[in-house]
Image (cartoon, coloured by chain):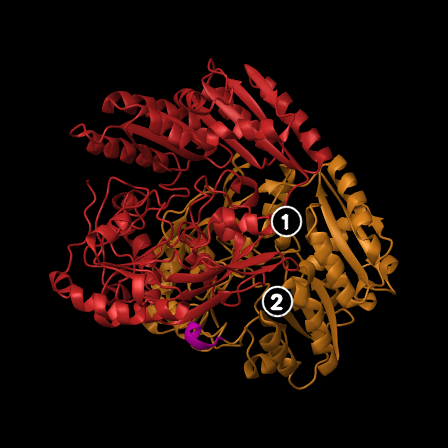
Chain colours: A red, B orange
Amino acid sequence: MSVRMPEPDQALLARRDEIVRALRAIVPGEGVIATERGMRPYETDGLTAYRQLPLAVVLPETTAQVAAILRYCYAETIPVVPRGAGTSLSGGALPLADGVLLGMAKFNRIRDIDFANRVAVVEPGVTNLAVSKAVEHAGFYYAPDPSSQIACTIGGNVAENSGGVHCLKYGMTSNNVLGCEMVLMTGEVVRLGGKHLDAGGYDLIGVVGGSEGLLGVVTEVTVRILKKPETARAVLVGFPSSEDAGACVARIIGAGIIPAGMEMMDRPAIHATEAFVHADYPLDVEALLIVELDGPQAEVDHLIATVSEIARGCGAMNLRVSTSEAERLLFWAGRKAAFPAVGRISPDYLCMDGTIPRAKLPLVLARMKDMSAKYGLRVANVFHAGDGNLHPLILYDANEPGELARAEAFGADILKLCVEVGGVLTGEHGVGIEKRDLMPVMFSEVDLAHQQRLKCAFDDKGLLNPGKVFPVLNRCAELGRMHVSGGNLPFPDIPRF
Amino acid sequence: MTVLSPRNPDEVEQAVLWAAGAGKALEVIGRGTKRSLGRPAQWDATLDLSALTGVTLYEPDELVLSAKAGTPLAEIEALCAANGQELAFEPMDYGPLLGVAAGRGTIGGALAVNASGPRRIKAGAARDHLLGLTAVSGRGETFKTGGRVVKNVTGYDLCKLMAGSWGTLAAMTEVTVKTLPRAETEASVVLAGLAATVAGDAMAAAMGSAYDVSGAAHLPGSVAGRISADLGGRSVTVLRLEGVGPSVVHRRDGLCALLRPFGTASVIEESLSRPLWRAVRDSLPFAAGGPSGERVLWRLSTAPSGGAGLVERIGRAVDAEFMQDWAGGLVWVAVAPTQDGGTAAVRATIAACGGHATLVRAPAALRAAVAVFEPQTGNLTALTKRIKDGFDPKGVLNPGRMWAGI
């Protein structure tokens, strides 16, 4: 465990009983959990290498309770870690020993479905998939579809700006959220956006998306819903090399086609998933591409033909077009089960999440192969090929001394490589604690200070989810200071009139 | 007034540092096409970014383009078009409304005001296409945010904060945007003679279909007639379909059938559809110098289904002309130049219907007397002020343009 969390405040630890009593006064009955046994399920999230019991767990049911909890914690300077379903892969919901874990699971109602405006108003604890389920009777769905969609919640999706295989065409969470109700750390409630399509004033709903629970606690979200396309079909293509597959991706997009989804797997991932779900993937290929086209039948037929022709021209070894909905789902079954499939062949794995310019894929894969040899750890790759988002899965065994540290070092090298080739540290999983200490690879001190000033506007005491995203915790008073000199133009040579 | 024309980002930094040190307020402009939009605040100098020009990166296969903030939008659009691509958010050109020639805006200006066109309902707003940027904050420091890839959650999404901040937080020096394939063809389905409420229902039906409508507007007869004589006389409700040929044909027929309960639809082919949507995008029926050029102009954003009700309510209170875009969610209101320019009616209506209103065109005296941007309320006022103070503590950049004190 190489990432260090802020040192717990001993004074807060000593006040635990008093804090629990105060929380119970706000949320009665079983809504406050303070036993070790009861808090154990909250000690980690999807990044299971890191575990920490919180000071207490509180599960509010109303916005008023959330506001009262935050108002109390603000007044008493107690850190708060918000949590949705706890599926974060970056440690975003990792508790703090001296902090209150604020679980939003009881906010699980759908408040309004408005087909005339094509939006749904939901509480943050509603699962991603439940939104689609609630509107499917009318032929609608909610487009962002992270692979954890059966479990992950909308509140968590907003915090991480989650994507999914269809975000190439339909956008990430931020692109599909129009409004929210949010409680600030002070307990103040703000409403951002609504059912209208653009912000009046600063686009605060825009910055809340992907803010990893550091700016406020969302208590209601207004999301856009879309009519389901008439039809969807997928093409499954095997290639002799990842270079060929990468070239195919570039040529599809170069032909003016934006598929609904375009996913790639490398040989280790293909073999792991095929052994797990028997999707009938070809096993003699180095790279497998799944391209999904959706829309009206006429358009899909037209584009399937074009994509097939491009794929053959790029050296496809085999190519299958789904002829039924069952077959289309089978094509996806392997890809969607890639994480658990890899879990079967290794005791543990780390899932990375860098994004790169697509053209750099062959280079990055080749360098990753070298790193794999250097660190003595296997890696399997699934890749949102359409938008350049890589998910290398580093296989390790936590019971082997030193393997976790080696896996983390390997992961850090991959992410540094992503930045080196013009990409970024994380495409959709968030920085959390996992990539926190790598932020300076991508951002200068000045860049990070500007981000933290936004944080200060929302949370001046730095109490919401501290220790996440930013490697150094600067005090807002220091960040706010500005020294200016004189009043003379220091650049006499700038043209002026 | 002093005009500072930095030639590179370093000089932008120096200019802002000078202003911060000297306690001066800077008006931040690109090529000045939207200068008369906003509160007529008092500036000490103008920071003119129009010399920061040039496309610095364009990789069509990667769907990405970077340019200096002062690069003319027209140049970028032409470059994209030459590669079969476009900026899918269809940036609106405010020039014609504000008495400036068309086609003069910059990419930085379009993004700073989050200028989204009719395709907002399908492809997203300008803010959804801004991938990364470099800017000089009011602290005189250059920072970057985002990147050049579509999928990126590394740190806060300050791109979204900058889009729509009207230059009040930072002066952008370089931006990176997503480019997308330009549709092979388009056609529009038109229903004539619908009342506004019925038109609202027709647009909702179309948007709730699987026909992938990329524009939905309702124009009263008098307004439509200014775009094309063929459209004059009766109101028109127009629905745009874009894509590959066979798809557009299929969806056109399907949409006409779906809309049968609202009347018999006619079809406008690509050659007429493109200029029609450009006119809707730029709100040309209300252009300066046109028949309504003297009117006070408001831009209202509301829930799409509320558009018709909003129009009716304002129409009862003041002498106004209307045009609805975004399936009813964007309403242009041109009010006869009376004393308050419809302010009381517009603000009361927004308070009742939800959303926000911007006073796009009015004499300076009116813009000084009434709120131009939607007045902020409650906790949002203080939060906005804290954000401004974080990025521009000395109030150097466009202070007072959106609201007093911001």
B111 inside magenta stretch:
no
Left or right of residue B218: residue A413: left
Using the image, name the chain to which the residue with label 2 belongs.
Answer: B
Query: Are there few (<14), some (14-19), or many (20+) residues within 10 Å of tag 1?
Result: few
The residue lying toward the viewer, choosing from B160 and B336, is: B160
The residue lying toward the viewer, choosing from B30 and B2, is: B30
Rendered position, A268 above or below A469: above
- Labels 2 and 1 positioned on one and the same chain: no
Q: Position of residue A175 (x, y in %)?
A: 52, 51
**Residue wearing tag 2:** B302
Tags 2 and 1 touching, CB below 8 Å: no
Image quadrant where one finds the C terminus of chain B: bottom left
Q: Which residues are magenta?
A: B376-381
Q: Position of residue B187 (x, y in %)?
A: 77, 46
Q: Residue furthest bottom?
A: B339
> Which residue is painted at 57% across and 41% down in the image?
A169
Residue B357 position by quadrant: bottom right
Q: The disc labelled 1 sits on which kind of residue?
A: His
Q: How many callouts does the rendering have?
A: 2
Using the image, name the chain to which the residue with label 1 belongs.
Answer: A
The residue lying toward the viewer, choosing from A3 and B140, is: A3
- SS of the residue at dot 1? helix
Rendered position, B21 above or below A30: below
**Residue wearing tag 1:** A137
Is residue B278 something one can see in this rendering? no
Left or right of residue B371: residue B325: right
Q: The disc labelled 2 sits on which kind of residue?
A: Thr
Residue A125 position by quadrant: bottom left
User: How far is disc 2 from disc 1 in space, using C-alphas?
Assistant: 27 Å
Q: Position of residue A97 (x, y in %)?
A: 19, 55
